[in-house]
Image: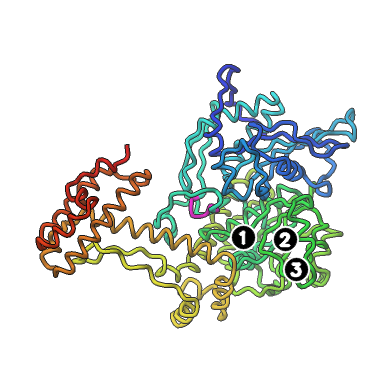
Amino acid sequence: MNRSPSFSVKSESSVKVDPESLQQWAVAFCVIRFDLEQGQLIEECYPSGHLSSEEELDVAFSSFPDSVSQHQNRSSIHDCMFFFRVQRRQGSAPSNVNSNNARGNKYLYGYVFNRQRHDERLKRGGEQKSVVILSHRPYSSVFRPLLQIMGPLYFDIGKKALEHIASYVSMWPAPLPGKLMELPIGNAMLKVNLPPAHSLPLDNGKHEESSSSMAPLLPTNQSIPQGLFHDSDIFGIFRGILLQLWVLWELLLIGEPILVIGPTPPQCSEAVASLVSLVAPLLFSVDFRPYFTIHDPGFARLNSLQEGDTFPPMILGVTNLFFLKSLRNIRHIVSVGTPAGISSRQPISNRFSSGGVPARPEGSGLQQISFKKFSPSSFLSAVKLRREGPLSLMTEHKEAVWTSYTAVTKPDTSILNRLIDAGMSPRVEESMSVVNNEILRRHFLELTTNFLAPFGPYLRATTPSEGSSPFVDPPPLPQFNVDEFLASLSARGAGKFLSKRMRSNWLDLYRRFLKGPNFMPWFERRRAVAEQEQHRLWREARMTTDITLFISKMSELEIVDSFNAVERHLQWELQVSKLGKVSDPAANTFEKLTKDLQAVFNVLPKDMQQLLLMNPERAALLRGNVEDTMPL
C-alpha cells in the first residue's frame, strides 16, 4: 500500500481547513497507538472535540486487530486495512460538535490503516499504530483510496499528514449520493461512485431522492452503484462457499442475525460489506458491524441473552473465536477467508461436476463437496464438519456456513459456471475478480429487483389522466394490506424470473420478508418518495395546463372547488418558497397560479366574488400582491 507518487503536500502557510465542509465527509482523523502497559491510546484526533471520551474509547478498541487474529510476521512492516461501525453514544457528544452532525447520526464508520512494525530493539519486538478516518457516511469507495494515501503519508511526515488531508477534503463539494465524483487530493484525483440516496440509512441525514432512482429496473450502466459497498469483493471473500450465497441472500432479505468469522479484520469486514451489498437495491435496515470486538458497548447486552432468547437482527464480523461460545443464540454462522500464510487462490474449475453430493441447506459441509470431485474422504470430512458444527473452528479454520434455515431460492449454477478461473496467478486473479464480482452483483441485483417488483403498484406515482384537471388533489396511493397482497401474489404467481429459481414454497419467503426488519423501513421510504414524485408530476402538469379549458365544462360547485384548490396550491408555493424548498424560479410559478386563480374567480357569480374578497389575504392573492410574502 504505497502512497501515490503524484501526491504532494501543501506548504505550511497554505494549510487551511473549513470545519463545516470537512464534516460533510469526515468527522475526524485519528492516530491510535497500542501501548503494552496502557492499551490503546489516541495520540492525535484532528480536528479535536468531535468525540466524547466514551466514543474515543470505542474507536480506539475497534482500531486494532484482535490479539487472536494477529500472526507473527517475518517482514519488518505489515500493513492492513479494514473498517468498523460503532454506535454513537446518545447524549455524550461534546458541546462544540456541530449540531447537524451530532444529532440524527446513530453510527460512526471507522476506516483503519493499521501498521505493525517488527523491531527487536523495541519492547515485545515491535509496535502497532492505526490511522483512522471517522465518518457518518459508509463511503468505502472514497475512504479506502484516501486511506491508502493518508496512512503511509502519516508514517512519512507525522501529524502534518492529518492536517494536509483535512485541508484537501474540506475543499471537496458536498457529497452527491448515486453520482460519480472527482475529488482532488494534491496532484491526485479520486474518481468515485457514491452509493445512491435510497441505500443510505436515514440517520445520515436527508438526501434528495427520486422515484426514478428507486424504480425496479435494472441499470444499463454497470458502473452505477445500486446499494452500499458496491466495491466489495464478493467473489474473493466467498470463493470457497459460492453455492451458499443464495442461502445468505435469503437470510439477509428477511433480517436474520448472522455471525461472520474471519481470520483477520480485513477479511471479516470485507465479508460483512459484501453481504450487505447482496440485497441491493433494498434499503438494508439491519444493524451490521464489519469488525466487532468484546470491547463494544453492545457486547455485554448480547452476551447476557439467555438460552432461547431471540437474538436481535444483526450481522457481526468477528475474528475472536470466543464469540462462538458467548453468542450461542445466533443460529447462522459463516466462516470465511484464510489464515495468514495460506493461499486463498484455489482453482474453481470442476466445482460443479455431476459426481458431487447434492447440497443441503442445513449442512454446509455437504455443500462444499459440490465444489470438488466426489471422494469417500471428502464425504466423510463433510459429515464430520456438519456434526461438529462451528465449534470445529476452534481447532482448524475452514470456510463454511452453519445454519438450520432451509432456503427457498435455488443456487444458480449457470451464473457460477460463468465465473472465470484465474488459476494461481495473483496478478491475473485481481482483474478476473473484477469480472466475477460484476457477474455476481448483477445476478443478485436482478434477483432482489424481481423479488421486490410485486410491491410496485403500491409505490407508483400517477399523472393526471388525459382530459382530467391537474388542479384537483391527486388520488392517494393504493393502501397496502398484507393479507390482500399475499392472496393476490399467490393467485398471480412468482413471475417467470423467480419461478425458475425458487421452490414451490416461494410465498413463505415473502411472508418472512413482510414480518422482518427490512420491509417496513424500505416500503415507507419508497412510499414517501412515490408521494413526492406524484406531487411533482401534478405540479408540473398544473404549470403547463390552461385552466380555462376546464372551467367552461364545470358546474358552479365544481368551479368553487377549483378556486379553493388553486388557492391552496398557491399558498403552498408561497410557504415552501419562504422555506427555500422550491427548485424552479418561484416568480414564474406565482404568476401562473395567480392568473389561474383570477381566471376561476372571474367566472364566479358576483355575490360569490364579493364574499371571497372579504378575506384580505385572498384579496391580496387575487391582486397578485405576493411580493411581501416572497423570500428575499
439 sits left or right of 582 in the view: right
Disc 1/disc 3 C-alpha distance (Å): 27 Å
The residue depicted at 51 percent of the width and 62 percent of the height is 522
Q: Can residue 373 be seen in this view?
A: no
Q: In this view, does 364 lie above or below 44?
A: below
Q: What's the CA distance linking mark 3 and mark 2? A: 17 Å
Disc number placed over residue 259 in the picture, else none: 2
In front of the other: 122 or 44: 44
**Could you tell which of marks 2 and 1 lies nearer the N-terminus?**
2
- Give the mark toward the camera: 1 or 3: 1
The numbered mark at residue 365 is: 3
Say which amino acid is labelled 2: Leu
In 3D space, how far apart are the residues under numbered discs 2 and 1 (Cα atoms)?
Answer: 13 Å
Vertical placement of residue 116 versus 605, above or below: above
Sequence-wise, the earlier of marks 1 and 3 is 1
Position in image of residue 9 (x %, y %): 60, 23
Split into 4 quadrants, where in the image is the N terminus?
A: top right
Query: Looking at numbered disc 1 in the image, what kind of residue is underneath it?
Result: Val
Q: Residue at x 50, y 33 (%)?
A: 172
Q: Position of residue 392 (x, y in %)?
A: 83, 64
Question: Which secondary structure lies at badge 3?
Answer: helix
From which residue to which does the magenta span run? 196-201
